Amino acid sequence: MKRQSVEAGERLYGWLFAAPWLIGLFIFFLLPLAASIYFSFTTYSILEPGEFIGLRNYRELMQDKVFWAAVYNTVYFAVFFVPLSIVFGVLLALFLNMKVKGMAIYRTLYFLPTLVPQVALAVLWMWLLNPHFGLVNGMLDKFGIAGPAWLGSEFWSKPSLILMSLWGIGQAVVIYLAGLQDISQDYYDAAEVDGASWLQKVRSVTLPLLTPVIFFNLVMGVIGALQQFTLPYSLTKGQGTPAHSLMFYVMHLYDNGFKYFKMGYASAMAWLLFLAIMLLTGILFMTSKRWVHYQGK
């Protein structure tokens, strides 16, 4: 009986210590989550409770031209940025993993852009990509190349945003670098004995054993790309110009929820985004068994 009372007291203390976190989880996560599901079926507008309208918000989304433009821009960004970030990230990590003098300085330089706030980053690149006196077009002029309008062009605006985002992949590079340093030297020694070249070592040893890290950055990259907001919002002051070419999904969601006070409409958008992210993440996890390799397996 004494032992049972002691165990009961320990469980009680455990629940008491966990209670603040559980209360916070309920108030700030579970309750808003449930509320957003309900609001997506209503005309709730923050200022007014609204009324239940069923699937009308979802039907209106299918007829919203700006919604489809935002979907296209977001998918375009994700399709190009995520693979490019993986390729450039792995290449930079391979370079930064070399044992040369002053490598700590190079690693710091490549990581520094990630410390720049997104708003400051937008201001910096708006100056660099200015079509008239920007540094990028100025350098192109020296080679006899007429630079495009970049952010002022409907065609070049998204590639410009991808370029800016690639400039700040330092965090992913650090993760790749950690993954490279976790690979046992024994694998490289065995490949050396077999007469493998540097390129063969990278292809047969480094990349297969780096796939768990690549998979992690792939999943996080897809989730982050589908939620792109701060940089395009800062570049266009929330307008998504020119011609909605920089109007991203979360920007349109924000506008509906906090500019037009169509919170029910925004909640419907949020749940569609959630379902899309869950679906893509599930597909990535299901396919990972075919190409992700772990050491010792």
Image (cartoon, grey):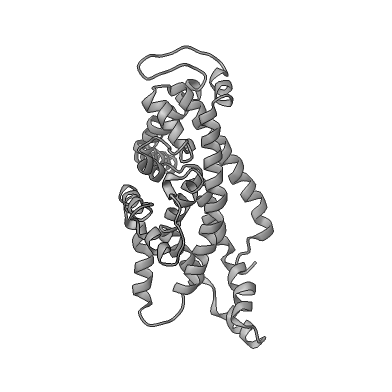
Name the residue located 63 percent from the left edge and 72 percent from the top edge.
Answer: 203
Left or right position of 124 against 240: left
The tally of labels here is: 0
**Residue drawn at the location 51% of the way across and 43% of the way down:** 226
Residue 288 place in picture, x, y as percent: 64, 55
Q: Where on the picture, by quarter, is residue 112?
A: bottom left
Residue at far right of view: 290
- Give the residue displayed 50% in from the left and 72% down from the top: 94
Q: Residue 22's quadrant in the figure?
A: top left
- Asked whether 63 or 96 is in front, the reply is 63
x%, y% of residue 80? 55, 52
Q: Residue at x 32, y 57 (%)?
A: 115
Q: Does 98 sit above or below residue 218?
A: below
Q: Residue furthest top?
A: 51
Residue 106 is situated, as x and y percent measured from the top left of the image, at 37, 72
The image shows residue 94, relative to residue 286, as above or below, that is below
Front-most of 138 and 176?
A: 138
Considering the image in quadrants, where does the N terminus appear?
A: top left
Quarter holding the C terminus is bottom right
Q: Which of 155 and 196 lies nearest the eye of the viewer?
A: 155
Picture coordinates of residue 149, whole percent (x, y): 43, 49
